[in-house]
């Protein structure tokens, strides 16, 4: 990305004003330099005593105007105190201690951190949302002139030797008490997924779900968001009536966002050819797998637009890999644990491209959510040789134990009752979650007819940005933190247990 243009001279004093100083002498830098002695002198001259209670309850200094910031009812409920006990804010050295009452643990907040996360208009540009100063230019322990933790749970801090006050809502203050440390999480909690086997997915299609027309996808906002929600929930949707043309797969993908470039290009063709550099470019059977396990990053979404499919055979196969992972987690946690270890090497080794990456077969996030799988037997590299051979190999995670666990995982993936099968028709475009849904293809005859799919990828970053928009559009704004992911994981395990009819968890 090219460097941004230098700021005009008239704007060069913005940082100085933000930190409470006049226009600095050094101009034309992305971040303006600040004199360390000047910072230190200003800090020392305004430094309060080592321990000083600045505000209690609603008492505040007359010269510190208060901004009325109301938190949500949920956040205010979290902030409730014992009757007659006022909240407090106390500075001790470089820490601000917030007292919420005798029934709640006080919260210690670093003054440096607090000053750095100020998001007022002087600290964060209102138009671009970008920071107007560098963390490295702040004092080690910014001095506080006054602080107030109000009865409604909001916090206001006036900085000594500075030109503005910082304010946080009750929701933000309560967020600091959670395990994510108050960081503004970039994402909302993911959409709760719906897991499926063949019968369940066929039932969704029969009810008119997981299918949207090209016109609706590209021109009807409501229909697009419903279809995108189905993609987030199930990991597999069909866009129908797509016009004939090699560029149409790009248009379908661009409704979600920009394409992910790989060494195959922005788009690529799936056609049978002689001496193919990829098994997908043959007519032979292609087992269930996920694409580009050797790549960083692994593409999140894959799109395949059918332009021709008149050969005998060539049916597409799909299976819910995360459902299979949860099945092992529920029924054979010992095998699931082996698959959660980074033991498998994936590679692509065909001139001029050489890629390799080691991954686990199943992957969890903080909070225990089984997020994705890594499975691609055609692109699996040799395992590292173990010091002791065969059955003499010792250890909890050996090749023999991984093979046992992988066989159970594969059996679940490929069970006929778990695989959805469809022969794509010209004008259909499948969109699926490559982190979750495994795909394959039956062998097809090349003597007559033709089979041609046009494909492209979309990255996880682009997908998550759209998923955030979906969640906010639907009013689902829980942050993506371990606490809420843990609840989501429990809910998802219950859904899989219900699908599998496991007693005690249905």
Image (spheres, rainbow, N blue to C red):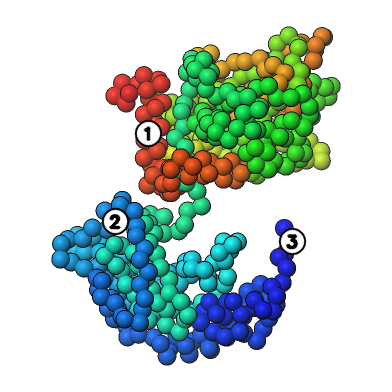
Q: Quadrant of residue 181?
A: bottom left
Residue 483 horizontal/vertical position (percent)? 37, 47
Circle on res. 2: 3
Label 1 packing within 10 angstroms: few (<14), some (14-19), many (20+)? some
Q: Is residue 425 above or below residue 322?
A: above
Residue 365 horizontal/vertical position (percent)? 47, 43
Q: Quadrant of residue 104?
A: bottom left
Q: Which residue is mark 2?
A: 76
Residue 466 horizontal/vertical position (percent)? 57, 42
In the shown orientation, is residue 29 left or right of residue 401? Answer: right
| Of the two numbered discs 1 and 2 in the rendering, the one whose residue sits closer to the viewer | 2
Residue appearing at x 42%, y 79% in the figure: 159
Whether residue 31 can be seen here:
yes
Quadrant of the snapshot with the C terminus: top left
Residue 11 horizontal/vertical position (percent)? 64, 76
Q: Which residue is mark 1?
A: 491
Q: Is residue 70 above or below residue 354?
A: below
Quadrant of the snapshot with the N terminus: bottom right
Residue appearing at x 79%, y 21% in the figure: 272
Circle on res. 183: none
Q: Quadrant of residue 103?
A: bottom left
Label 1 element class: helix
Give me the C-alpha separation between circle 3 and circle 2.
45 Å
* Count of numbered labels shown in the rendering: 3
């Amino acid at each position: 990305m090219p460097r941004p243009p230098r700021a005009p001279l008239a704007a060069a004093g913005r940082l100085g004003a933000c930190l409470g100083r006049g226009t600095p002498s050094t101009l034309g830098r992305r971040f303006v330099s600040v004199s360390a002695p000047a910072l230190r002198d200003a800090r020392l001259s305004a430094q309060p005593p080592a321990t000083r209670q600045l505000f209690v309850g609603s008492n505040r200094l007359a010269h510190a105007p208060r901004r009325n910031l109301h938190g949500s009812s949920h956040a205010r409920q979290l902030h409730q105190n014992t009757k007659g006990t006022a909240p407090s804010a106390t500075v001790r050295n470089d820490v601000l201690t917030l007292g919420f009452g005798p029934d709640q643990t006080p919260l210690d907040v670093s003054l440096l951190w607090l000053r750095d996360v100020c998001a007022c208009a002087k600290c964060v540009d209102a138009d671009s949302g970008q920071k107007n100063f560098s963390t490295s230019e702040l004092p080690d322990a910014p001095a506080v002139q006054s602080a107030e933790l109000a009865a409604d749970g909001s916090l206001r801090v006036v900085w000594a030797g500075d030109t503005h006050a910082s304010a946080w809502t009750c929701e933000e203050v309560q967020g600091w008490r959670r395990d994510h440390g108050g960081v503004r999480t970039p994402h909302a909690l993911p959409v709760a997924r719906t897991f499926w086997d063949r019968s369940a997915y066929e039932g969704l299609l029969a009810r008119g779900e997981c299918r949207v027309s090209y016109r609706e996808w590209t021109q009807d906002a409501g229909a697009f968001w419903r279809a995108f929600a189905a993609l987030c929930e199930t990991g597999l949707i069909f866009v129908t009536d797509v016009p004939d043309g090699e560029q149409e797969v790009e248009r379908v993908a661009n409704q979600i966002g920009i394409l992910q470039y790989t060494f195959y290009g922005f788009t690529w063709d799936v056609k049978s050819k002689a001496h193919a550099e990829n098994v997908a470019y043959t007519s032979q059977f292609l087992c269930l797998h996920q694409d580009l396990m050797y790549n960083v990053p692994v593409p999140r979404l894959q799109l395949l637009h059918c332009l021709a499919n008149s050969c005998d055979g060539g049916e597409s196969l799909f299976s819910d890999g995360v459902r299979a992972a949860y099945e092992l987690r529920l029924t054979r946690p010992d095998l699931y644990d082996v698959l959660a270890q980074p033991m498998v090497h994936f590679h692509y080794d065909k001139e001029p491209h050489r890629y390799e990456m080691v991954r686990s077969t199943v992957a969890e996030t903080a909070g225990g959510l089984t997020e994705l799988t890594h499975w691609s037997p055609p692109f699996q590299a040799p395992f590292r040789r173990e010091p002791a051979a065969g059955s003499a190999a010792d250890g909890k995670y050996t090749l023999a134990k991984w093979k046992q666990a992988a066989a159970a995982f594969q059996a679940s993936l490929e069970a006929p009752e778990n695989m959805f099968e469809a022969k794509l028709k010209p004008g259909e475009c499948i969109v699926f979650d490559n982190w979750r849904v495994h795909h394959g293809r039956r062998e097809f005859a090349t003597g007559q007819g033709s089979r041609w799919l046009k494909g492209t990828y979309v990255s996880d970053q682009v997908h998550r940005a759209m998923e955030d928009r979906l969640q906010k559009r639907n009013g689902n704004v829980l942050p993506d933190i371990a606490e809420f992911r843990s609840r989501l994981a429990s809910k998802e395990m219950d859904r899989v247990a219900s699908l599998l009819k496991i007693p005690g968890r249905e």
